[in-house]
Image (cartoon, rainbow, N blue to C red):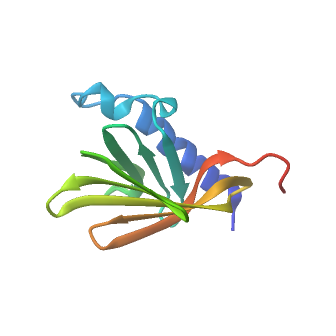
């Protein structure tokens, strides 16, 4: 597996989530800097990034556009609820059939060359994405 494209994709998604869109910008709370969120996670195949905030969860996924160039698809969900149980932390947002769920377990997880503190599962409309999140663990190889 090539690590550089994965890292580049994660950086591109992160930048896309923290910068206003080129089109008319949605409310600025959707694109607040990543530090304004209480939790973040990323994964590959496809490359994705999720940011969990006090009032919304934002998911960005890379895909290939009709012109063959990569593009970032962003979706935000309001009404965040939290469920902290001994084995995991869970967040849900959205209403009706548009609901996203994020679950994080304390378990070292490797993403490219980084080791993060949590293994993560994101569920959206019957689709499941797996990746890593939380803070980087220092001193691990």
Say if 43 sits above or below 52 in the image.
below
Q: In this view, does 83 lie to the left or right of 79?
A: right
| Residue 96 percent coordinates (x, y) | 14, 60
Task: State which quadrant residue 76 falls in.
Answer: top left
| Residue 16 percent coordinates (x, y) | 43, 38
Residue plotted at (44% across, 32% down)? 18
| Residue 11 percent coordinates (x, y) | 56, 42
Viewport quadrant of the N terminus: bottom right
Q: Residue furthest front?
A: 86
Residue plotted at (45% across, 67% down)? 129
Viewport quadrant of the C terminus: bottom right
Q: Nearer the viewer, residue 84 or 64?
A: 84
Q: Which of 37 and 19 is in front in this view?
A: 37
Whether residue 44 is visible here, answered yes or no, is: no
Task: State which quadrant residue 118 falls in.
Answer: bottom right
Number of numbered discs on residues? 0
Whether residue 91 is visible here, answered yes or no, is: yes
Q: Which of 10 and 130 is in front in this view?
A: 130
| Residue 43 percent coordinates (x, y) | 54, 59
Residue plotted at (39% across, 49% down)? 60
Q: Residue furthest left?
A: 96
């Amino acid at each position: 597996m090539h690590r550089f494209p994965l890292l580049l994709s994660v950086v591109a998604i992160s930048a896309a989530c923290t910068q206003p869109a080129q089109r008319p910008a949605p409310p600025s709370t959707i694109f607040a800097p990543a530090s304004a969120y209480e939790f973040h996670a990323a994964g590959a195949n496809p490359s994705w990034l999720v940011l969990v905030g006090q009032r919304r969860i934002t998911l960005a996924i890379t895909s290939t556009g009709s012109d063959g160039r990569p593009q970032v698809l962003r979706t935000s969900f309001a009404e965040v609820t939290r469920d902290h149980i001994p084995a995991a932390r869970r967040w849900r947002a959205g209403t009706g059939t548009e609901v996203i769920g994020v679950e994080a377990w304390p378990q070292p997880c490797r993403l490219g060359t980084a080791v993060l503190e949590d293994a993560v599962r994101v569920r959206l409309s019957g689709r499941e994405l797996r990746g890593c999140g939380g803070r980087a663990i220092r001193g691990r190889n």
